[in-house]
Amino acid sequence: MNINAKQLLNETIDKIEGAYAPSTIRAYRANFKRFIAFSENLKATALPAESDTVTQYIKQLSGGQLKSASIRIAIASISAIHRLNQLIDPTTHPEVKIELRRMHRNLGRASKQAQGINLETLKQMIGNTDTTLIGLRDRALLLTAYDGMCRRSELVELRVEDISRGIDDQVKIKLRRSKTDQDGLGRWLHLKAETQGAIIDWLNRSGIETGKLFRGISKGNQVSDGLSAAQINRIFKKLARRSKLAPEIVQHISGHSMRVGAAQDMLIVGENLAKIMQRGRWSKTDTVMRYVENAIFT
C-alpha cells in the first residue's frame, strides 16, 4: 500500500540534500520511515496521510518510552515531508493538535538537559589528556568546544582551510555554518591562547594540512577523514570517566556539555544575556535560559 510513499520519501530526501542540515535530513528520513511502517499496520496511506492516522500514531508514541520532545520531532517530520511535496499537512488538523496537547499534558514538555561542563571540570578533563596523538586531539577538541561554545555539529565541520594565522601567529577559525546560520554566512571564532596552542600542537603532530580539523584515530595511530557527532559524545564521556566524575554526571554529558558549561560560567561572572547569546550564537532567549538555569542556583 505504501510503495509509492517509500519511493516519494526517497525522492524527497534526494531533492533536499544539501539544502538542509545533514542531521535534519536524517531525522526526516528515519521518522517518516517509522510512520510508514505504522501506517502499513493500519492498512492506511502514509503519504498523503489522513489526520486520523497521525492522531493514532501520536497515541502509540505516547504510550512508549519516548519523551515529548522526540514525539514533537516525529510529528514535525511528517509535516515537513508533506509540505515539501505540496500535500495537505495532516498535522495541522484540530484533532491532531488536540492529541498533541493531550500528549504534552501526560508527558510534560521538559527536555533532557545536557550536563554542563564548566571551567573547573574542563581543567580536570584536560589534566587527563596526554601527549599521545589521541591526547593532543582530545585536548584541542575540549578547548575549542568550550572556548568557541560549539555545538557538536559545528565541531565536526571545522576545517583546516578555515584557520587563519595572523602576523603575531594568533589563530582564529571561521565557523562556516551553524544551526542559526543556515545560509552559511560564517563567523570567526576568536580563541584564547591556550586553545590556539592546542590546535597548533594537534596539527603539527597529526600532519593534517587540509580537510576536517578533528579526526578519528585508530589503535595504530591512523588518522581518519573526520569525526561523527556521536564520536564527540563518546570522547567527552571517556574523558569524564577518566577524570573520575560521578556516574550520574557522566550519564548526562553530551556533545553540548561544553556549550552549556561555558554559558553557565559566563552568567556566574556577571555577563548579560545578550552577550551570552551573541557568543553562543543563540537566537532564542528561552533556550539560553534553559541552559543557564542550573547555574543560577549553584
Image (cartoon, rainbow, N blue to C red):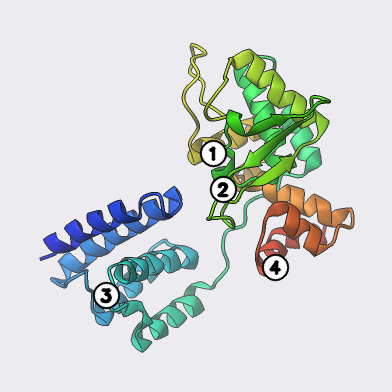
Q: Name the residue under label 3.
A: 87
Instruction: Please tell me how crowded label 4 is: few (under 14), some (14-19), or many (20+) other residues with Cα within 10 Å.
Output: few
Q: Mark 4 points at which residue?
A: 285
Q: Which of marks 1 and 4 is in front?
A: 1
Q: What element carries label 1?
A: loop
Q: Which of 154 and 113 is in front in this view?
A: 154
Q: Mark 2 points at which residue?
A: 177
Instruction: Work out whether mark 1 precedes mark 4 in sequence or the reverse, and give the earlier one.
Output: 1
Q: What residue type is labelled 1?
A: Glu
Instruction: Work out whether mark 2 precedes mark 4 in sequence or the reverse, and give the earlier one.
Output: 2
Instruction: Please tell me how crowded label 2 is: few (under 14), some (14-19), or many (20+) other residues with Cα within 10 Å.
Output: some
Q: In this view, does 119 lie above or below 70?
A: above
**Image location of residue 201, percent across then percent down:** 70, 19
User: Which mark identifies residue 157?
Assistant: 1
Q: Is mark 4 on a helix, strand or loop?
A: helix
Between the residue at mark 1 and the residue at mark 4, the CA separation in whole angstroms equals 25 Å
